[in-house]
Image: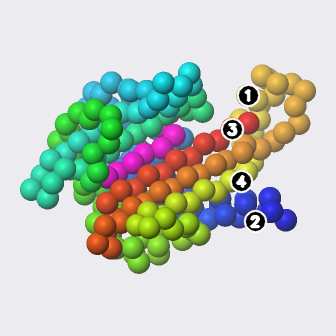
Amino acid sequence: MVLWATALCAAEVPSQTFSINSATVGVTALGEVQKVYGTAEPVRLSNEEEADVAICYMHSSTKGESFLVFESGIMGGYKDITGFRISTIRPSINCVATKIDVGTLTTENGVKLGQSLEDFKKTVQVMFAYHGSRLAYEGAGQRPATQEELKMLRSKWPNTIQNYFDVTTNIEAEFLGNRLIDFYIRKIESY
């Protein structure tokens, strides 16, 4: 029963939430992102052996600074993005300037900086935990492997019968004065 409820929760996140300005979690490579926003050196997010890497972009306008961070890790082969953050809060890593006004970007389903809490909850209809002005969500579930993926997996592990990927999704959103100032989403698929 618990596994079914968890899988149902993970399936609730609209797939469009994972895409911003043609960059999609699990699909787009960091190199492709750099072609759009500019060259940025990937930086390790911690000193741990298999720590994720990130590239950060910053745009300044009359409205202030906005930041766009793309992450990748071992599950993305350190090349495919596994998550992104759009924020008005300066990250702890160095960011390179981009001409693209990242503060005006929206996910394919309409998440954007400055969005009201009410509108955000209509756009991303999952059960968030509230931590003051920060909302957090973690969903775990499974997705069936495609025939192409199964063929690749069977060639690497011929004796396995598993035909699905475990999927973990994390979302964090922070609000100030009822307006979205920080949005983070991550999806990890593992076999």
* Marks 2 and 1, the one that precedes in the sequence: 2
- SS at mark 4 in the image: strand
Seen at 84% across and 39% down, the residue is 162
Where in the figure is residue 153, as x and y percent of width and height? 76, 29
Residue at mark 3 = 190
Residue contact at pointers 2 and 4, CB within 8 angstroms: no
Q: Is residue 109 magenta?
A: no
Residue at 12% across / 52% down in the picture? 61
Q: Are marks 2 and 1 in contact (CB under 8 Å)?
A: no
Answer with mark 2 or mark 4, whichever residue precedes in sequence: 2
Give percent across and percent down for residue 152: 73, 28
Q: Which residue is mark 4?
A: 141
> What residue would you read off at disc 1?
152
In what quadrant of the picture does the C terminus appear? Answer: top right
Residue 57 occupies quadrant: top left
Q: Amino acid at mark 2?
A: Ala
Residue 80 colored in magenta in the image: yes
Q: Dot 3, how many residues are within 10 Å of its Cα: few (below 14), some (14-19), or many (20+)?
A: few
Compared with 19, 98 (above or below) is above
Q: Nearer the viewer, residue 145 or 120?
A: 120
Secondary structure under badge 1?
helix
**What residue sits right under mark 2 in the picture?**
5
Q: Quadrant of residue 134?
A: bottom left
